[in-house]
Amino acid sequence: MAKKSNQSKTLPIHILNGPNLNLLGTREPEVYGHTTLAQVEKMCVAQAASHGLSIVFRQSNHEGEIVDFVQEARTSASAMLINPAGYGHTSVAILDAIQMLKIPVIEVHLSNIHRREPFRHLSYVSKGATGIVMGLGAQGYLRAIDAVAEILKGSK
Ligand code: CA2
């Protein structure tokens, strides 16, 4: 009979994407690039696997659903990446949910929100984030996964 391993498997990294990101790659490529969200997901799966990690990748256009996803991460994720999209600039509810997490949280933005319109300069989510990656396009998700892998390695 196969021996039971006492090595516990790391929980997946949850990657949450906010409103309109389902349309990524189809409009405003000069701001957000040509990569679709499905392609970003594939890239994230590969990057996480290179660190021996797995991901759960989600997108929602609904604030309450994103709050539900964040709450779910409390017990089923080792870390969370979140591109809150427009809700980053408005949602105290998403910030409140993030502040209940005890895992690393990396906020990701494709664009550098500080080079854009003043109303994008404030992100409520930033107050609850361990770290922030912005302005690197889809590559930013991969760098955020690298950061999380490093943090999780250090906490083992
Ligand atoms: O740069 C980012 O990642 C943003 O989170 C993207 C949000 C924007 O409201 C934030 O200020 C910065 C917008 C996501 C909209 O997604 C689109 C996808 C395809 C085409 C146009 C927009």
Image: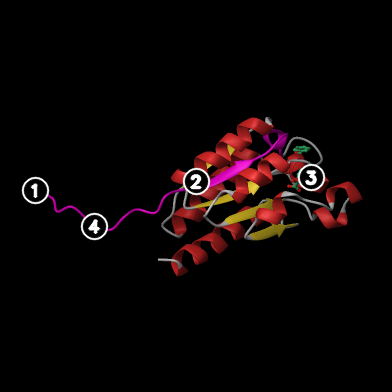
Q: Nearer the viewer, mark 4 or mark 1?
A: 4
> How dense is the environment of label 1, judged by Cα within 10 Å: few (below 14), some, or many (20 and up)?
few
Quadrant containing ligand 1 reads: top right
Q: Nearer the viewer, mark 1 or mark 2?
A: 2
Q: CA distance from mark 3 to mark 4?
A: 44 Å
Mark 3 or mark 2, which is nearer to you?
Answer: 2
Disc 1 residue type (three-letter): Met
The residue that label 1 is drawn on is 1
Could you tell me which residue is drawn at 46 percent across and 58 percent down? 50
Query: Which badge, 3 or 4, comes first in the chain's sequence?
Result: 4
- For badge 2, the amino acid type reads Arg
Q: Which residue is mark 3?
A: 89
Mark 2 packing: few (<14 Cα in 10 Å), some, or many (20+)? some
Q: Which mark is residue 6?
A: 4
Task: Indicate the position of residue 156 as horizontal and vertical percent values.
Answer: 40, 66
Sooner in the amino-acid sequence: mark 4 or mark 1: 1
Which comes before the other along the chain, label 2 or label 4? Answer: 4
Decide: is 146 above or below 58.
below
* Label 3 beta carbon less than 8 Å to ligand 1: yes
Query: Can I make out residue 59 in this image?
Result: no
Label 2 and label 4: CA atoms lie apart by 23 Å
Position of residue 149 relative to residue 16, above or below, is below
